[in-house]
């Protein structure tokens, strides 16, 4: 967690895990203090937009024409994909490559026993609702999914093939990410989170860099209004060379890590 502040405004920026093992004890110490002090919570998606995400996904995910997975993946990647799919029916032939990536990620998280209900956003939402404090979002569900929908076809295919190739290591990668996050190891977290996307520049630009730039503009505008905000976004946005804290520091704001 980082803090950017001036004389009358404090914005805590908390790097989150969207899904965690049940019972993970994260809501304590300085995080709990920041939540208690904050007047409002800013998430990637508001609770209302999060509730709409499934319907938006169902609308955007289908392909114009079906395409068999055998035509998308080389033999080794296809075999790994089929192992992950198991008895599930992803309906992949009818879906865009990016949509299959989303379903693969959900299946890996489920196998690693990570649950969105135990994630940071769910916990913070409950805390702020109980306190009667407002909760907002930086993006809409459609805008967030359109980041993937509008990736060019070659980039989507590259991401899909890389993900399928890495399926046998995916659960260990998820475990490593959760452990790095739990102990606050920003360098290790940056390596795990960014290792694959760094190798696909178009994806990194759309999913990480451009969003961080937009969010940094929001932070700068919000600094003009007094008060305390807890801004909670995926931890990958707060680590690395083009992280949100790094962008804000480059703009001359004072940013310090507090947790």
Image: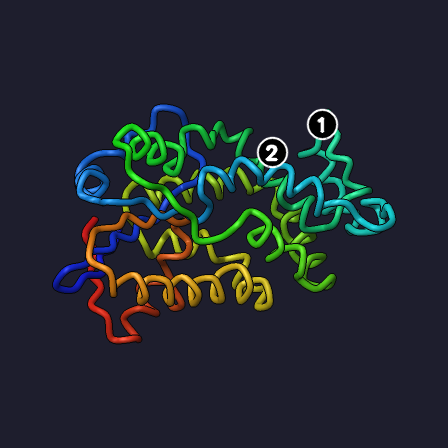
4 is higher (above) or lower (below) than 92 = below
From the top left corner, tell me how far across and down residue 156 is, in percent. 69, 57
Question: Disc 1 on helix, strand or loop?
Answer: loop
* Mark linked to residue 107: 2
Dot 1, how many residues are within 10 Å of its Cα: few (below 14), some (14-19), or many (20+)? few
Dot 2 lies on which element?
helix
Residue depicted at x 32% and y 66%: 221
In the image, is 111 to the left or to the right of 65?
left
Lateral position of residue 140 relative to residue 87, left or right = left
* Nearest to N terminus: mark 2 or mark 1: 1
Task: Determine which quarter of the picture holds residue 106.
Answer: top right
Instruction: Answer above or below: position of 50 versus 151.
Output: above
Bin the neighbour count of mark 2 within 10 Å (Cα to Cα): few under 14, some 14-19, many 20 and up: some
Closer to us: 46 or 232: 46
Q: Position of residue 208 (x, y in %)?
A: 48, 61
Residue annotated with mark 1: 88
Query: For the image shown, how many numbered marks are present on the structure?
Result: 2
For image coordinates 12% across by 63% down, the residue present is 7
Please tell me which residue lies in front, 150 or 83. 150
Q: Quadrant of residue 9?
A: bottom left
Determine whether label 2 and label 1 are within 8 Å by CB. Answer: yes
């Amino acid at each position: 967690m980082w803090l950017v502040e001036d004389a009358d405004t404090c914005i805590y920026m908390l790097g989150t895990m969207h899904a965690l093992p049940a019972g993970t004890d994260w809501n304590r110490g300085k995080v709990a203090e920041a939540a208690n002090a904050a007047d409002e919570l800013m998430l990637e998606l508001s609770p209302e937009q999060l509730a709409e995400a499934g319907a938006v996904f169902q609308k955007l995910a289908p392909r114009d024409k079906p395409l068999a997975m055998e035509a998308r993946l080389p033999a080794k990647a296809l075999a790994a994909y089929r192992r992950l799919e198991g008895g599930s029916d992803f309906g992949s032939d009818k879906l865009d490559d990016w949509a299959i990536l989303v379903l693969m990620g959900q299946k890996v998280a489920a196998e690693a026993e990570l649950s969105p209900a135990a994630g940071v956003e769910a916990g913070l939402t409950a805390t702020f609702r109980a306190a009667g404090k407002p909760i907002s979002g930086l993006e809409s569900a459609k805008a967030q999914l359109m980041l993937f929908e509008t990736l060019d076809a070659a980039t989507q295919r590259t991401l899909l093939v890389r993900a399928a190739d890495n399926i046998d290591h995916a659960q260990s990668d998820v475990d490593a990410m959760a452990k790095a996050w739990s102990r606050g190891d920003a360098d290790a977290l940056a390596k795990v989170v960014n290792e694959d996307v760094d190798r696909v520049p178009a994806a990194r630009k759309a999913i990480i860099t451009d969003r961080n730039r937009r969010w940094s503009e929001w932070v700068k505008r919000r600094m003009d209004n007094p008060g305390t905000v807890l801004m909670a976004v995926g931890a990958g946005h707060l680590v690395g060379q083009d992280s949100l804290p790094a962008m804000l520091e480059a703009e001359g704001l004072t940013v310090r890590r507090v947790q």
